[in-house]
């Protein structure tokens, strides 16, 4: 099977949309783009490819100011605390970003270089627009500062993007707007001159770009793009007359700030650059890896609710740089992940923090369940009770029984012969896992289900091998140990601690290739065990277990 780059050995740039630094990450945050980006990046490394997977804090969002006001702290203090929390949560979950970039002087310089270049190329337009306004506070209300109903689907929304339907909500488009910081405040409207990016000028190019990708990208993304591109596209705000954010450098808009979403692409470039620095490289510029001449495979992992920005605005921005940058090879989306069949809500306290999950459940088991219940094509659900039942019965118990049975078959220090049919079985197993990990057929849930399938199969074969005649036992053991080693190789992007433990013992090197197992003899090894509880974890009894994992 061909690899995702067609075998050309292109460098790989992976971006998980930078999380807003207005709090730590809950399970709903990590279950979508970040776990998926981590699994795919680990898979690419197991193929021997040059990968940079990076992210960083999104400090300029207005949601930082609204959360800080709700918590009674300053935006700066909230950012500092949240940045550290997010970074440590990534580490706790085994999400191995090469770098979690800070918002430092180099970051700001990268953003200004990016927007100033577009400005110099004449890509922005000065427009007079009508914006929600607070007469009582003397402030414009944009993005996360204003709530109301989406004019497209009528869902409760915020300014900018409706996370329910994915449509852009124009400047004065919200129905019945209200001030998030002061719900009793009467919202009026005022005109303002801002710089905008005229998306309509790129519609034909965007149509061609998305139609070319339609056969391999997820259906919900394709459907939304066709819907949005079937009619004229709006002017997208580059600056806003608000106080929070990076000061806009343009002479036409003194005193304004850069729209936080405009930072998305230069922020991603800087995150990749920062990741390369952590790997020991010294790129000449912060945008070097994205330059078209390097022909990198650029992959975005983002939630469906942000697709208007990532799949239209950002792609058009890259096009507007007139050939300077590569365009994304794939934008892989996820749907919402719910908690006990309700939306995660920080303000209502309806959440499970990701760090608390892995303090209670070993992260390999947590990652397995998040993969199995991944919100790939529809909303799915997190339930602690279902995690315990499903992970316990389908993974932990059969995995440990396989390891225990293999230990009885082991012959210390003795090479074990491998029968002729073993390589064909391993090749079939690897082919199915690789099908799940390749971008055009990427599925975390099917990959996790394969873990269950092959663990059960090998457990049954190992139990049967205990009844074999003594003369046949070494070859049966050789077959089982080599297949189990191949299984652990295949699941190494998911069960990261199992793989790390074997690697630490010098018994394992992840290389997801059938050729790596084309051997005549193998050796026994100890299969690392799994547990349903982290050592020392203590929590109350679980509620009744639902019958479905979604």
Image (cartoon, rainbow, N blue to C red):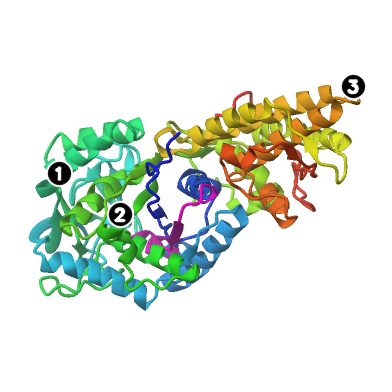
Distance Cα–Cα, label 2 vs label 1: 19 Å
On screen, 108 above or below 548?
A: below
Mark 1 or mark 3, earlier in chain: 1
Residue under pointer 2: 295
Residue farthest along the bottom direction in this orientation? 105
Nearer to us in this view, 221 or 379? 221
Q: Which label number is shown at residue 20? A: none
Decide if residue 504 is on the left or right side of residue 87: right
Decide if residue 480 is on the left or right side of residue 281: right
Mark 2 or mark 1, earlier in chain: 1
Mark 3 or mark 2, earlier in chain: 2
On screen, 19 above or below 528?
A: below
* Figure quadrant of residue 321: bottom left
Let me know if residue 188 is in the magenta part: no
Q: Which residues are magenta?
A: 45-68
Residue under pointer 3: 469
Residue under the image location 68 percent in, 50 percent down: 497
Q: Which label number is shown at residue 205? A: 1
């Amino acid at each position: 099977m061909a690899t995702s780059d067609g075998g050309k050995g292109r460098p790989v740039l992976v971006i998980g949309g930078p999380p807003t630094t207005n709090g730590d990450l809950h399970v709903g945050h990590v279950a979508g783009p970040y776990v998926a980006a981590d699994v795919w990046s680990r898979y690419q490394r197991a193929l021997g490819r040059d990968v940079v997977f990076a992210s960083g804090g999104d400090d300029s969002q207005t949601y930082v100011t609204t959360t800080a006001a709700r918590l009674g702290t300053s935006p700066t203090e909230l950012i500092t605390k949240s940045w550290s929390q997010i970074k440590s949560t990534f580490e706790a979950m085994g999400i191995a970003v090469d770098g979690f970039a800070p918002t430092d002087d180099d970051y700001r310089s990268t953003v200004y270089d990016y927007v100033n270049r577009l400005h110099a190329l004449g890509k922005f337009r000065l427009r007079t627009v009508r914006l929600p306004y607070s007469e009582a506070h003397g402030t414009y209300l944009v993005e996360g500062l204003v709530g109301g109903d989406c004019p497209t689907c009528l869902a409760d929304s915020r300014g900018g993007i409706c996370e329910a339907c994915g449509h852009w909500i124009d400047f004065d488009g919200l129905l019945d707007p209200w001030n998030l910081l002061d719900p009793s405040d009467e919202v009026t409207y005022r005109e303002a001159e801002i710089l905008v990016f005229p998306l309509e000028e790129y519609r034909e190019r965007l149509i061609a770009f998305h139609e070319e990708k339609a056969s391999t990208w997820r259906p919900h993304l394709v459907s939304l793009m066709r819907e949005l591109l079937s009619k004229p596209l709006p002017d997208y705000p580059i600056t806003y007359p608000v106080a929070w954010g990076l000061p806009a450098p343009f002479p036409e808009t003194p005193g304004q700030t850069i729209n936080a979403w405009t930072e998305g692409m230069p922020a991603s470039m800087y995150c990749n650059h920062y990741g390369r620095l952590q790997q020991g490289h010294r790129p000449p510029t912060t945008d070097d890896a994205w330059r078209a001449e390097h022909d990198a495979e650029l992959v975005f992992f983002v939630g469906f609710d942000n697709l208007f920005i990532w799949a239209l605005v950002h792609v058009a921005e890259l096009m507007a740089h007139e050939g300077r940058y590569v365009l994304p090879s794939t934008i892989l989306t996820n749907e919402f992940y719910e908690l006990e069949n309700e939306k995660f809500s920080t303000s209502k306290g309806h959440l499970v923090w990701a760090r608390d999950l892995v303090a209670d459940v070993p992260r390999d088991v947590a990652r397995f369940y998040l993969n199995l219940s991944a919100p790939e094509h529809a909303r799915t659900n997190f339930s602690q009770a279902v995690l315990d039942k499903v992970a316990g019965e389908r993974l932990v118990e059969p995995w440990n029984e396989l390891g225990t049975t293999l230990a009885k078959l082991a012959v210390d220090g003795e090479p074990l012969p491998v029968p002729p049919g073993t390589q064909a079985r391993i090749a079939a197993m690897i082919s199915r896992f690789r099908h799940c990990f390749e971008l055009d057929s990427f599925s975390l849930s099917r990959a996790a289900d394969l873990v269950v399938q092959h663990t059960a199969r090998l457990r049954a074969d190992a139990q049967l091998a205990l009844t074999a005649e003594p003369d046949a036992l070494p070859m049966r053991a050789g077959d089982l140990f080599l297949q189990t080693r191949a299984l652990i190789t295949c699941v190494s992007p998911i069960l990261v601690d199992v793989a790390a433990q074997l690697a630490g013992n010098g018994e394992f090197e992840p290389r997801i290739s059938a050729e790596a197992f084309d051997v005549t003899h193998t050796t026994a090894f100890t299969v690392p065990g799994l547990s349903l509880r982290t050592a020392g974890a203590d929590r109350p009894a679980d509620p009744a277990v639902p019958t479905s994992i979604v």
